[in-house]
Image (cartoon, helix red, strand yellow):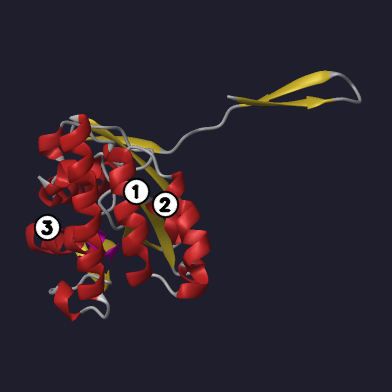
Amino acid sequence: MLFEVDTEVSICKFRVISIPTIEVNGTTLYFENRGEGVPMYVLHGGPGLDHRYFGRSLAGLENIRELYYIDLRGHGKSSKAEKKTYTLETFADDIDAMRRELGHEKIDIMGHSMGGFVGLLYSLNYPAHLDRLILVGTPAKHTKIKGYYQLKATLISINLKYYIQYKKEKTIDRESFAREILLKSWPLYVPEKLLPEYSDYIKSLRGLEIFFDMQQ
């Protein structure tokens, strides 16, 4: 609950803020929706990311689509769940459960990177309820991405660094490990002029252990 104070008349005005969440499949999904028109579910990449990095980049669609920016389970402001449920299949099932709860007969999906894989699974499992699917940066083969092999060498170095740490200290800071991987990977996906802004975003993320939970 947030409150405002009117200093001139010394009256407190209370303003209740409703947080947009929805209960589906035994978990709570956080979402933000903007615009009007046909519902389009916007699915973020990852693991470990959330909807915030889209910023206002899709604002131009808001006069023809009602955009639902969703944090997938275990990501962002959505609730944590059992590790075994952190799968692309479960994410797709969550999206359809959300669709039913919101009363949408058909939806569009825009999926970026990992979100695109979720969208592909949704199209296979729930084709009757999908109108359009837009994939952004969802490659069939990473080796075709420019800079992939340089990144792979960097990631091997990071893995070695934390492996040595584990051997010496018998413990590992998984949060720092995941954040370093994401920071080193980001230049592959983001134009150079946007790197400072997106690096700040990566540094703001919490709960990055899901990065490893999903790798397993």
**Residue 13, x across and y down, in percent:** 73, 24
Q: State the SS at label 2.
A: helix
Q: Is residue 106 visible?
A: no
Determine whether, in the image, residue 65 is placed left or right of residue 83: right
Q: Which residue is mark 2?
A: 202
- The nearer-to-camera label among 1 and 3 is 1
Q: Residues within 10 Å of mark 2 (few under 14, many from 20)?
A: many
- Amino acid under disc 2: Ile
Q: Is residue 189 left or right of residue 146?
A: right
**Image label count:** 3
Label disc, if present, on residue 106 of the rendered structure: none
Foreground of the two, 113 or 169? 169
Determine whether label 2 and label 1 are within 8 Å by CB: yes
Q: Earlier in the sequence, mark 2 or mark 1?
A: 1
Q: Is residue 93 left or right of residue 31?
A: left
Q: Of marks 1 and 3, which one's residue comes earlier in the chain?
A: 3
Q: Position of residue 57 (x, y in %)?
A: 48, 67
List x then y, in percent, for residue 177: 28, 45
137 versus 197 height, above or below: below
* Mark 3 neighbour density, 10 Å: few (under 14) some (14–19) many (20 or more): some
Residue at figure coordinates x 56%, y 32% from the top left: 17
User: Is residue 150 at all visible to an observer of this figure?
Assistant: yes
Residue for badge 3: 126
The residue closer to the viewer here, 180 or 30, is 180
- Identify the element where label 1 is drawn: helix
Q: What are the residue bounds of the magenta stretch? A: 109-115
The CA span between labels 2 and 1 is: 7 Å
- In the rendering, which numbered label is found on residue 179? 1
Q: Nearer the viewer, residue 74 or 40?
A: 74
* Marks 3/2: CA–CA distance: 32 Å
